[in-house]
Amino acid sequence: MSKLIIAGGQPLRGKIKISGAKNASLAILCGAIMAEGEVIIENVPDISDVRIILEILGNMGVKIRWLADEVISLTSPQEIVGDPPYELVKQLRASNLLLGPMLARYGKASVSLPGGCNIGVRPMDLHFKGLLALGAELNLERGSIQGKTGRLCGNMIYLDFPSVGATENIMMAACLAEGQTVIENAAKEPEIVDLANFLNALGAKVRGAGTDLIKIEGVPVLKGGRYSVIPDRIEAGTFMVAAAATRGDVVLENVIPRHLEPLSAKLREANVDVEIGEDTIHIKATNTSAKSIDIKTMPYPGFPTDMQSQMMAFLSTVPGTSIIVENIFENRFRVADELKRMGANIKVEGRMAVIEGVASLQGAKVKATDLRAGAALVIAGLMAQGETEIGDVHYVDRGYTHLEQKLAKLGASIRRA
Ligand SMILES: CC(=O)N[C@H]1[C@@H](OP(=O)(O)OP(=O)(O)OC[C@H]2O[C@@H](n3ccc(=O)[nH]c3=O)[C@H](O)[C@@H]2O)O[C@H](CO)[C@@H](O)[C@@H]1O
Ligand SMILES: C=C(OP(=O)(O)O)C(=O)O
């Protein structure tokens, strides 16, 4: 098991290029199996979640070739040669996004339920509700979803909650259904828009992605095509917060600033200077004294749950009392216990965390409890006095491309052991 060792106390300074979005790439890679021709996807991040989903697709008979760094070619078979293997599926939540595409293209699917994970339960009732409304037959057998269908049929689907995964699964399946599907109260996250743009590049007819009403006109086939994934707003956000937390001066390149507005607004409220360019964001925190703030995680365009832990690390040394309310995933405060080992003063009460800013954190041995918790501990380690050793770094590797190299380029003292 590798560890990250950080000698804290250096403000981050310099420029960094943001990679392609994990959460968009994973959905797009699943959607690619619906195409009848070769699909080329650019700007795919080199992270373990991508490697696992590719292994799953390979097991199903998808031909996969890396054409260059971050560029993948995929060609799906006429018939699936094997089900997604449980051993791989259980390692990543996003494998549940194979359900819609498999049903739509192959008329059958067998995918293990994701079950719970470290950040909370990951139910799929809304995915089921949508796919059943499109005419699929779904059964749960020994922890695995077994689905079959003839050609799916468009329908009106209202989501009780704007679930990102359910919107993606239903939207993908509806692309090959007969007639029109309307998803009401759809998720509006940028990754939904990216997936819709990708599907449209293959010949799908999806309109309204990015609003809460998505309309999909089914087509008989999707063809091959080429598509470039959007930049990762959460990787970008993590570097923004790391820059703010170390009182640094960092320019992020290859970002879509609009996607980061919920975070930029909160950082400005905390007195951090955020300058927006066309595809850059400049964080200047060298001369600022940060202020405590309150945060509530919400579906987009609210504050993202995936940035909550990193903000908790930052706020732990901001004078005053900050409050975070986590509305999406019930177990996303586990990182508080690790931050407390470094001297943070955080009280967790159900879905609320109260953070009393302390003068500084001290380096300690800590463990990543999930992906963004790991990112938060990296930020805490960069701020802390002395050495921090972060265990269970495999969580961090799920979602960050070349994290140590990028941070070292900004002047951090960080190494893997
Ligand atoms: C709204 C939201 O912030 N979604 C986040 C969620 O997407 P992901 O797609 O994993 O999760 P959903 O958006 O579906 O889930 C959000 C909420 O809806 C509930 N739920 C979901 C599906 C379902 O069928 N039934 C149900 O009750 C979940 O328990 C959760 O409380 O995790 C991703 C990884 O961290 C983030 O990138 C997404 O931004
Ligand atoms: C928790 C995350 O991802 P996943 O839904 O793939 O577990 C995340 O991206 O922060």
Image (cartoon, grey):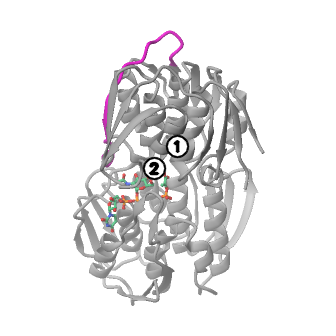
Q: Answer whether residue 279 is visible to the viewer in this image.
A: no
Q: Is residue 212 above or below residue 38?
A: above
Callout 1 amino acid: Glu
Pinpoint residue 304: horizontal percent, then vertical percent: 38, 44
Figure quadrant of the N terminus: bottom right
Magenta-highlighted residues: 284-302
Residue 76 place in picture, x, y as percent: 62, 76
Instruction: Please say if 339 is above or below 271.
Output: below
298 in magenta = yes
| Residue in the image at 43% along x and 78% along y | 220
- Quick check: 291 above or below 306? above
Q: Which mark is residue 324?
A: none
From the viewer's perspective, tell me whether residue 318 is left or right of residue 361.
left
Q: Quarter-wise, where is residue 381 in the image?
A: top right
Amino acid under disc 2: Arg
- Please, what is the dominant secondary structure of the magenta stretch? loop
Q: Residue at x 60, y 84 (%)?
A: 78
Q: Quadrant of ligand 1?
A: bottom left
* 26, 326: nearer the viewer: 326
Closer-to-camera residue (351/188): 351
Mark on residue 334? Answer: 2
Q: Which residue is mark 1?
A: 338
Evaluate whether residue 365 shows in this view: yes
Is 269 a magenta residue?
A: no
